[in-house]
Amino acid sequence: MAAVTGAPTLGLNVKPSQISLSSKLHMPQRLSSTPMCRRSANPRVAVRAALDAKPTVLVAEKLGAAGLDLLKDFANIDCSYNLTQEELCTKISLCDALIVRSGTKVSREVFESSGGRLKVVGRAGVGIDNVDLAAATEHGCLVVNAPTANTIAAAEHGIALLTAMARNIAQADASLKAGKWQRNKYVGVSLVGKTLAVMGFGKVGSEVARRAKGLGMHVIAHDPYAPVDRAHAIGVHLVGFDEAIATADFISLHMPLTPSTAKILNDDTFAKMKKGVRIVNVARGGVIDEDALVRALDAGIVAQAALDVFTEEPPPKDSKLVLHENVTVTPHLGASTMEAQEGVAIEIAEAVVGALSGELAATAVNAPMVPAEVLNELKPFVLLAEKLGRLAVQLVGGGSGVKTVKVTYASARAPDDLDTRLLRAMITKGLIEPISDVYVNLVNADFTAKQRGLRITEERVILDGSPERPLELIQVQIANVESKFASAMSDSGDIKVEGRIKDGIPHLTKVGSFEVDVSLEGSILLCRQVDQPGMIGSVASILGEENVNVNFMSVGRIAPRKHAVMAIGVDEQPNRETLKKIGDIPAIEEFVFLKL
């Protein structure tokens, strides 16, 4: 990613003294020691010898031998499994780092019990739902994960489920073992020439696409951030969400679970699919409304499903979805290969050792410590920056993806007196997190943006006046994209949103060419309308009837009786019927609902 001249660079150029891991650990001459690796249901706390300066790493769940070998060269290793929360809290005060998988909950109580000694938590895998990130950051503890080592394993499992589903492998196997010979019942379908929609074209999704192309399938993909050239290089065509699900014979899910993707496959989206579609999910269980999937299977809209992940794991024994005859299931085996397990162990061991040595990890998932005076001054603008990023990316339509973003800061301060690293990181966070499972922060923002082909440039506009306030406004522009809300396009053809801080609260003050003024609290409904009497009342009345509370409303117009944009802040999300009623108002030309 190209940085603007004079702008400070994020991520790998941040000095260790600027983050919570403030310096490399002082390590005097150390004594040799033997790692302790034991399974313990009632562990005793091991006290480190006073002269032994090695850090101590607690491995609370099984880790591959290759990872343990790396750790042994650097630290004392305590492998204590099956710890209760009480046992973990007791032991953690003597540990500098903790490595877990998904089965150990690293709660606020754990960080409080560490007494400030715990410096790093390593999650051997991708998801970090079991780690309290806010508590980790508050206690100056860096959290790192291992997001890449299981890519091939997950992709291979996706293909395995795809082919097994198409040829009824699991059902035929069970039938034959039950003493039956039902060749006619288990006639499958061919993959050659069929259209596969890969929903989420990241590491795993792109590997699934490569393998599906090798099977003779026509592959399309949906991902707002996927580089078009990378997709074209392997013969994949990027399309919009609705086009992907409407044209696919097979759908393979590889999207993260975020508020915007939760139950993204539901009754409405199933209704848009080709009858007889087949669905594979090796991503996250929560992206499918499981009750809706059962209904779609029973109705014949979905012919078959192959699932490795579930909303609740393990799923209930009487789950209608798991027991459905047209569903093939596995118990979250996506990363379960010997090679992947060893790869994860090495990746997390390297990240933990690096972090304990004072290095910055590209896989850090929480923010480092920021000087209190800087954070205090920029605090409202940090929130504004993230919300503008979230708002802007939700305005993007079509399948072209976000590639170029320009951020403009207007301030009376000299450029050298305005550090925008944190602001740029939060804009990046807002742009990426709504459609990704990556946690963006000051450490990894530039790295994460570059990894996704996202080029962010910055521009400073120097204003006359007092430099007492750090900023007057922040403007975010996304170039070379279509918009779900045409009025958000500026005269230059870019999506443009602008915000200011008013009374300590972030406000949206401009959308495209329209001046508005709405508090960025809750969520926002944007409507372009014919400027005529009664419009505010008509929309507010519909929202009131549906018990949707309006917290702010503003109308910006080009000229009286022409076109206007109404921005409405709401505390609750209007349901589909409510939004339809608003769209049916004759003077409403377009509208969009945005989650913040």
Image: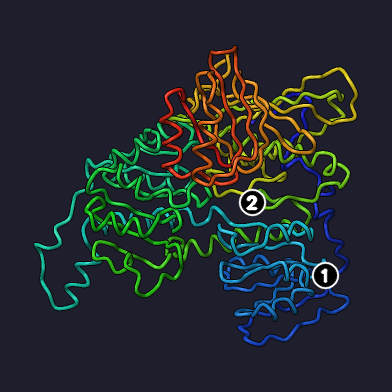
User: At x 49% / y 57%, what residue is drawn?
Assistant: 150
User: Looking at this view, is 420 or 497 the one in front?
Assistant: 497
Provide the residue designation for mark 2: 363
Q: Amino acid at mark 1?
A: Gly
Specify the amino acid type for callout 2: Thr
User: How many other residues sit within 10 Å of disc 2, few (<14), some (14-19) or many (≥20)?
Assistant: many
User: Dividing the picture into quarters, in which one does residue 249 lie?
Assistant: top left
The relative height of residue 566 versus residue 390 in the rendered view (above or below) is above
Which labelled disc corresponds to residue 586? none
Q: Residues within 10 Å of mark 1 (few under 14, many from 20)?
A: few
- Image coordinates of residue 241 in percent, x first then y, are 40, 38
Relative image position of residue 161 (x, y in whole percent): 32, 58
- Could you tell me which residue is drawn at 43 percent across and 28 percent down? 585
Label 1 sits on a secondary structure element that is loop
Q: In which quarter of the view is residue 548 placed?
A: top right
Viewer-side residue, 16 vs 315 = 315
Marks 2 and 1, the one that precedes in the sequence: 1
In x, y percent, where is residue 596? Answer: 60, 42
Front in this rendered view, residue 511 or 89:
511
Position of residue 293 relative to residue 179, above or below, is above
Residue at the image position 88 percent from the left and 66 percent from the top: 28
Between marks 2 and 1, how big is the CA–CA gap? 25 Å
Relative vertical location of residue 396 with respect to residue 265 in this rendering, above or below: above
Depth check, front residue: 358 or 188: 188
Q: How did the renderer colour the structure? A: rainbow
Indicate left or right for 569 with 32 as reference: left
The label number, if any, that marks residue 115 in the structure image: 1
Rendering quarter of residue 351: bottom right
- Nearer to us of marks 2 and 1 is 1
